[in-house]
Image (tube, helix red, strand yellow):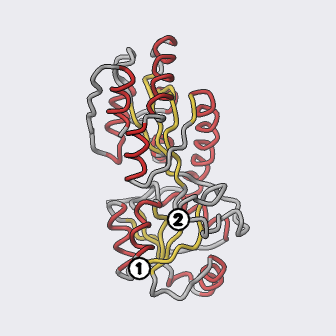
Amino acid sequence: PLAPALERVLKQSVVVTNKAGAAGAVGMQSAAVAKPDGYTLLVGLVSISIIPEVDALFGRTPAFTRDQFVGIARLNADPPILVVGAETPWKTVKEVVEDARKRPVDFIFSSSGVYGASHVPMEMFLHAAGLRMRHLPTTGGAPAMTAVLGGHAAMWASPPAVAAPHLKAGKIRALATWGATRLTAFPDIPTMKELGYDVEYYLWAGLFAPKDVPANVVKVLREAARQAVQDPEFKTAMEKIQTPIAYQDADTFREWWDRDAQTLAGVIKRIGKIETK
């Protein structure tokens, strides 16, 4: 939705290039080393903070580092929802914690992949609750949800937009969110903090440029992003994909991103090395 909104603001074409591979690292690395003229931008996700930490954990040369980017704006920030299958007995997080302490070997959570955007929040919760569970990493959000729906996993940290249709159909049950406040779309779901677990995590997206883009160009891009998120068609498109806009301008975003990245770095270190084939 962002590209057409930027086109309307900037009065020039904005071409979207999807560079898949290595959980997004290929596209981020490409943007990091692009010519810093303002014509190559990146819509980066929370993984922009996670991937460099995983590289460091394994002693690998990083695909990119955070300091290779300048943040233009944050676009959205959705806290995931802890969901369990409708056939499971748990109605609250307290019930999950009490049961998991008795038989941790029987508890499995699914995720979109090791160190992925839904693995990290589960590890944050388990640490805060003093729990251990078995982990079933899959290849994406849809397989992670399918694992819960099929009874192969008890729970996972689902993006709100992925959870919504299954909640409506009564196939899953929502127990908590990772946000500082309750989700507007799901006001009955308590936050982890309300329940006594001091964890906060967001599935966010931001607009970035290579770090050496001139200040005057950054200024133009900041203003373009500010106008783009107010564009009626952009707002409608975001509503259709059930992703609320959570805009932050560059200065506020920089501070927020630094705090968020520091938190995530600590989580990755605590998870430690998980060898995958």
Residue 143 placement (x, y as % from top left): 32, 67
| Numbered mark located on residue 106 in the image | none
Tell me if residue 269 can be seen: yes
Q: How many marks on residues?
A: 2
Of 179 and 227, nearer the camera is 227
Circle 1: is it few (<14), some (14-19), or many (20+) Cα within 10 Å? Answer: some
Residue 263 placement (x, y as % from top left): 62, 47
Residue found farthest to the front: 232
Asked which secondary structure carries label 1, the reply is loop
The relative height of residue 196 versus residue 99 in the rendered view (above or below) is above
Look at label 2 and name its amino acid: Ile
Residue for point 29% across, 27% down: 14
Foreground: disc 2 or disc 1: 1
Asked which secondary structure carries label 2, the reply is strand
The relative height of residue 95 versus residue 182 in the rendered view (above or below) is below
Residue for point 46% across, 14% down: 217
Return the residue at label 2.
81
Viewed as shown, does residue 102 lie left or right of 185? right
Look at label 1 and name its amino acid: Lys
Quarter of the image where one finds residue 79: bottom right
Residue 148 placement (x, y as % from top left): 40, 76
Viewed as shown, does residue 126 lie left or right of 274? right
Disc 2, disc 1: CB below 8 Å?
A: no
Tell me if residue 53 can be seen: no
The relative height of residue 226 versus residue 102 in the rendered view (above or below) is above
Return the residue at label 1.
171
Viewed as shown, does residue 105 lie left or right of 179? left
Residue 25 placement (x, y as % from top left): 36, 40
Inter-mark Cα distance, 2 to 1: 14 Å
Residue for point 62% across, 73% down: 131
Circle 2: is it few (<14), some (14-19), or many (20+) Cα within 10 Å? Answer: many
